[in-house]
Amino acid sequence: MNVSYKRVYLKSGKEESLKRFHPWIFSGAIAYAEGEPEEGEVVDVYTSKKEFIACGHFQIGSIAVRVLSFAQETVDHAFWVRKLESARALRVALDLIGNPQTDTYRLVHGEGDNLPGLIIDIYGSTAVMQAHSAGMHVCRLEIADALIQVMGDTVRNIYYKSETTLPFKADLLAKENGFIKGGSTDNVAMENGLRFHVDWLKGQKTGFFVDQRENRHLLERYASGRNVLNMFCYTGGFSFYAMRGGAKLVHSVDSSAKAIDLTNENVKLNFPDDPRHQAYAEDAFKFLDRMGDQYDLIILDPPAFAKHRDALRNALRGYTKLNAKAFEKIRPGGILFTFSCSQVVTKENFRNAVFTAAAQAGRSVRILHQLTQPGDHPVNIYHPEGEYLKGLVLYVE
Ligand code: SAH
């Protein structure tokens, strides 16, 4: 027997995107709601012809409902177990579970795993869970129970980190960060045999950027004998791969002193006392002006320049300016790994910004690889907005 939820009725014709399985319902599509659902409550969505079309989490805001299912289901323990099992099965297919070289990966990637509003990253035996919607926040303890069941012995601790990701207006209890299962201070995780301290307590996102795993691995293949500059290094991810790949020297740069401390700690973990590495807490542009001439492998992985559509034009200018500086400075025969993680910047937008930069610097540039996010950050084919990471590997003559 299905539980019956409060009903939300759509305006006439507003079911079209749902018939194509798009998981968001905007507030403008809603005619009325019965019984005043609260933020985070599960609602059943009906068309104007009073036919059931989806169920999802209700929220006050531009996205009013995030779809959990296109079938009439009860959102209970068994539901979360089914969803998490499906997410886990994909990571098994990607050889990310029980892999002796890599115990760090994304288990749930929001819409990409048909769980809009929920992110779960795994770092060894600790899962870091992040809610981006009121509904996922309300369900956090149920999800945590299901997660422990689905992951068996492999996950013993769950850290909940939603302080900065929840809508700040929502009147929600217990938004603060903390362990909701277990508790662990062992914070070293492994990616392709390299070890990293993960700062899930205070770090950015869930503590580490798991989405660059495969791109870092690719970089390793190009590093031999090169002078490497890892710009916007954060925890130093790309730097250790470059070192293992046989780089002559590796310089890591980040404007945050805390990021530089993390990077130095991680160097110690993997390559203690290796004189090839140096880290600098400095602004990217200033550093390129001062030191930029000596490198023949440069990584540019800046923070999202555009968080919203309104900021798109400025963001594209920012990408052009940054890449032009790198094109000006990089040595002949150099290789540039350049990225954008802004979701509103399309692949074409980004390529165009980099193209403009190359032309400004007057360099001959060829594209070697076009990169994106790895399979544990899957894109739901009905939700193309989920594709956010773009990268180009360029050979600069
Ligand atoms: N490449 C990293 C992730 C980068 S996150 C990885 O693989 O994990 C972006 C980083 O850019 C943050 O650590 C932030 O502190 C840094 N940053 C932001 N503005 C900067 C600037 N103007 N110059 C240098 N670093 C900057």
Image: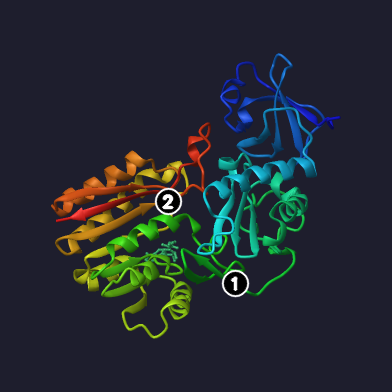
State the quadrant of the C terminus: bottom left
For the point 21% across and 65% down, the residue is 296
**Viewer can see residue 301:** no
For the point 14% across and 51% down, the residue is 364
Which residue is disc 2 drawn over? 341
Q: Does residue 23 lie above or below 305 as drawn?
A: above
Q: Nearer the viewer, residue 88 or 123?
A: 88
Q: Does residue 263 lie above or below 238 as drawn?
A: below
Q: Where is residue 91 drawn, in percent x and y?
A: 57, 49
Please state if 127 lies on the left or on the right of 254 as rendered.
right
**Viewer can see residue 331:** yes
Please state if 255 lies on the left or on the right of 286 as rendered.
right
Q: Does residue 293 lie above or below 153 as drawn?
A: below
Q: Nearer the viewer, residue 148 or 257?
A: 148
Q: Where is residue 299 drawn, in percent x and y?
A: 32, 61
| Disc nearer the start of the sequence (2/1) | 1
For the point 74% across and 54% down, the residue is 144
Q: Please, what is the three-letter code of the amino acid marked with disc 1?
A: Asn
Q: Residue furthest top?
A: 49
Mark 2 CB within 8 Å of ligand 1: yes
Separation of marks 2 and 1 at Cα, in angstroms = 25 Å
Q: Residues within 10 Å of mark 1 (few under 14, many from 20)?
A: some
Q: Quadrant of residue 111?
A: top right
Q: Nearer the viewer, residue 120 or 279?
A: 120
Which residue is disc 1 drawn over? 187
Ligand 1 sits in which quadrant?
bottom left
